[in-house]
Image: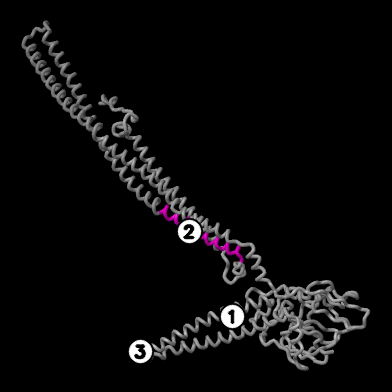
Amino acid sequence: MHRNRGSFGRNCTETMSCRWGTELWDQFDNLEKHTHWGIEFVERYTKFVKERSEIEIGYAKQIRNLSKKYQPKKNSREEDEYKYTSCRAFLMTLNELNDYAGQHEVIAENLTTHIICELTRYIQELKAERKSHFHDGRRAQQHIENSWKQLESSKRRFERDCKEADRAQQYFDKIDADINVTKADVEKRCSLKARQQAQLKHQVAEDSKNEYLTYLQKFNKEQNEHYYSLIPHIFQKIQEMEEKRIEKVGESMKTYAEVNRKVLPIVSKCLDGMTNAAASIEPTMDTKQVVESFKSGFEPPGDVEVEDYSLSMRRTVSESSYLNSRGEGKPSRSNSRGKLWPFKRNKLSLKLGSGPEDCSHLPPEQRRKKLQAKITDINKELQKEVDQRDALTKMKDVYIKNPHMGDPNSVDPRLEEIGQNIDKLELDSRKYEAWLLEVETRLAEKSDPHRRQSGLYDSNATTPVNNNCAPVNRESPDGSYTEDHSTEHHLKSRSTVFDDDFDDEDPLPTIGTCKSLYPFEGQNEGTISMAEGELLYVIEEDKGDGWTRVRRNEDEEGYVPTSYIKVFFDTNAKDS
């Protein structure tokens, strides 16, 4: 059966390519195991790519959440921080990081589309093809085994018949050679019967031999076809299937690398964007922006004037003095002695975006910038409304000339609405411009002391002084408020230390009266509370910091916001 096996073995290294049909003709079971392992390997690689895709999706999600977490929140303090170049660079970095996360999502999407889905489909096809090839191999194996069984059966039958023919021949020869037999007829009959039996057995053996030879010839032919044609053909298909599988894995690995390489240019651009964002940081510009943001417009205080107590003169407080002159020569009756600032910062400071409409809670310079920005916004809105009005007016003219295009009266409600908006915006613009003019005038007066002094006393005997821009329902800022200054700019204040009880021995004279327009709590040191409509004495006028010193009686005096009162100066008292 296997007489030619030795001639089948070949060394694969001696040929350009190995053929499984000739080299592995007897390794059917091992090929079945190997191809099964190959499919498991493809499934394992597919699982690896799938897990990598999930990692990319999770990473991209975490990167996006991180970028979103540090994005400036709308209408928050963080949004105001992005006027600095470093903060803007950080925002650019966050945006580039968001794009960077998008590239990882692209990687995951391409891995899923070009590898995972493709390999999943291919594995199903590979399993079906493998099953078909090994089914054909088993069927061929079964056929050659059945043919071998038939050959073995005919050979055993031929062997048996030959043995029976030999026994019959030996029996006949024994009877024919026996000389001791006495009865001739019996001998004749037995001899004839034995001869016939031997001839019959020889004929049966000859038929068995012919049948065996036929089956032998048939088996050899089928075996030759099996090992030289059928099995090599099946194994060649299996080899091609395996080579295709390996090639498919290689293509998938190449695609895996290309998917990652494809996003590298965009990732590089994202990294370049981050580098450019870092290069755009300008420390000098940021420090300049700090000046623009916090510059108050106040002038530094001047020298402290000499106060000679040896002279019998009324002690007054210098405009540019930080210290109360009455606190130098006598023991303190209050814990406020020696403090630099006249008013403490309120713990409940104004929130970002809050404050009076006229921005009077801000320092002069900041108030001027805020009002200018507001006027610019109003002018932009006003221009939009004007453009809409002009467009609607032209549309109405077209409707009047061409009634079939539309009703001219249908435009009137919108024109009326736009007209009202324009009137409101123009009113707001004039209001903010008036406040801006007031701030600029005050800043000009501070920069020109002679002009300030010349315009300070040009009123009549009792001239009311009032801030018309102050809102009626204004809440008391509790010490952090000034007419056009913030708490930090009380540095310009003419006195920074106040007694809880003012000097009873030498009180300041009254220079006028005032009436409170709004209630004021006066919780901070140096201030005095007042009720709406209350009448008080003025003992020291506003020196430009937004505060006026008043007296209720001999024991109660302090500072109140100038915009909260209406002042009536006594001309004679001021002249004296």
- Examine the structure image and report whether residue 137 is included in the region drawn in magenta: no
Q: Mark 2: which amino acid?
A: Gly
Q: Is residue 286 above or below residue 425?
A: above
Pointer 2 residue: 102
Question: Which label's residue is closer to the chain start, 1 or 2?
Answer: 2
| SS class, disc 3 | loop
How far apart are the alpha carbons under marks 1 and 2? Answer: 41 Å
Pointer 1 residue: 375
Name the residue nearer the viewer: 38 or 142: 38
How far apart are the alpha carbons under marks 2 and 3? Answer: 54 Å
Query: Does residue 175 appear in the picture of this structure?
Result: yes
Q: Quadrant of residue 136?
A: top left
Query: Of tags 2 and 3, which is closer to the observer?
Result: 3
Residue 546 pos. (x, y %): 73, 81
Residue 485 pos. (x, y %): 71, 77
Indicate the quadrant containing the N terminus: top left, top right, bottom left or bottom right.
top left
Instruction: From the viewer's perspective, tell me whether residue 1 is left or right of residue 43.
Output: left
Question: Which label's residue is closer to the chain start, 3 or 1?
Answer: 1
| SS class, disc 1 | helix
Q: Mark 1: which amino acid?
A: Ile
- Examine the structure image and report whether residue 97 is included in the region drawn in magenta: yes
Q: Is residue 157 above or below residue 424?
A: above
Residue 79 pos. (x, y %): 59, 69
Q: Residues within 10 Å of mark 1 (few under 14, many from 20)?
A: many
Return the residue found at the far right.
310
Indicate the quadrant containing the C terminus: top left, top right, bottom left or bottom right.
bottom right
